[in-house]
Amino acid sequence: MKTAIITGITGQDGAYLSKLLLGKGYKVIGLARSDTKEGMKGLEYLGIHNQITIIECDLTDITQIIKILNQYKPTELYNLAAQSSVSQSFANPIATFKFNTISVFNLLEAIKITDPNIKFYQASSSEMYGRVPELPIRENTVFHPLSPYAISKASAHWICVNYRESYNMFICCGILFNHESYLRTDSFFVKKIITQAIKISKGEQEQLNVGNIDIMRDFGYAPKYVEAMYLMMQKETSNDYHICSGGSVSLRDLIEYTFNKLHIPHSKIHIDTNLFRPAEIENIYGANDKAKTELGWDYNLSAYDMLDLLIEEEEKRQ
């Protein structure tokens, strides 16, 4: 039986990846921080919380990681842990950079010390690209990060490349663009517009307050994106891949589509300039042909297909 360790297991991706790996016969070990009781809801929602061993671990302490690797001897390690809020990274840039880089150094160094044959997956981010000269973005596009979070993820990405090239370790980076699901917390944009739109449709809320909604993003469906993570780790050699839909849509279009579906007038949309970020990417979408060709990843959902799935699931759970 293969054993996989997943950091950040209580997040959206950790929950769906755990379900996928359990279905393939893996033993799954989840690493979580001490304050994650609320985050266990995703694993409970998927009905898998009793099938996973959850261990409290501080990823800034390499001795804890080494002890866990020696005890469970994993074949694969998926690093999904990060301070992942862009807006929060502007408020706490040093803490964001410190955790998102030191944790990766510690994980890779612990693998190098205990068993260099452990396969490692790093959750990289499309935010690393920032301002780009042309679209679609490809895996060789130069990074120009526009937030402390993006800077930290770009640094972590290059740490992985360095270890892969220096020590011949199996290290792959999944560069994921925006991907959503029912398990997202209310702080994420798509979850916010769906849950609040449902409240507006029921007369429980007056309007939707949003920031800059004329920016465009590449949106996808999280349960399908974790399939690509798994496929990367089954290859004989490691590489980096874009996991994205291949197109972009404006936040305004997402809101209006949701409002139309729930029969809400667009006048209920309120622009709040206080919610604008200091720096913003105007448009971003990636090319996913490498993942489809080399991994055999099958993805053909549009952003509106994703919204249909999420609205339906959200309404069922209201």
Image: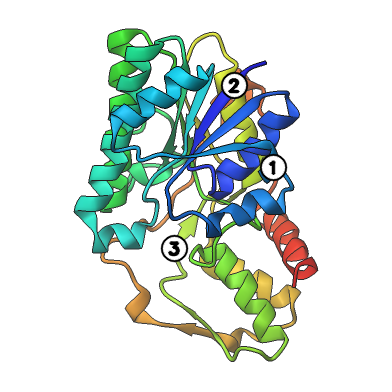
Q: Report the front residue among 294 and 317.
A: 317
Residue at 76% in and 70% down: 315
Q: Which mark is residue 3?
A: 2
The CA distance from mark 1 to mark 2 is 16 Å
Mark 1–mark 2 CB contact (< 8 Å) = no
Residue that badge 3 annotates: 215
Residue 169 higher or lower than 292, as above or below: above
Q: Quadrant of residue 183?
A: bottom right
Task: Tell me, yes or no, if residue 253 can be seen here.
Answer: no
Residue 201 left/right relative to 106: right
Report the number of numbered marks.
3
Residue wearing tag 1: 50
In this rendering, position of residue 137 left or right of residue 179: left
Q: Callout 3, which amino acid?
A: Ile
Determine the CA span between mark 1 and mark 3: 41 Å
Quarter of the image with the N terminus is top right
Image coordinates of residue 84 in percent, x first then y, are 40, 51
Image coordinates for residue 318, horizontal then vertical, percent: 74, 73
Of marks 1 and 3, which one's residue comes earlier in the chain? 1
- Report the Cα–Cα distance between label 3 and label 2: 41 Å
Helix, strand or loop for disc 2: strand
Q: Name the side, left or right, on which 88 lies relative to 31.
A: left
Of circles 3 and 2, the one toward us is 2
Name which of mark 3 and mark 2 comes first in the sequence: 2
**Amino acid type assigned to the residue bearing label 1 in the image:** Asn
Q: Residue at x 24, y 46 (%)?
A: 97
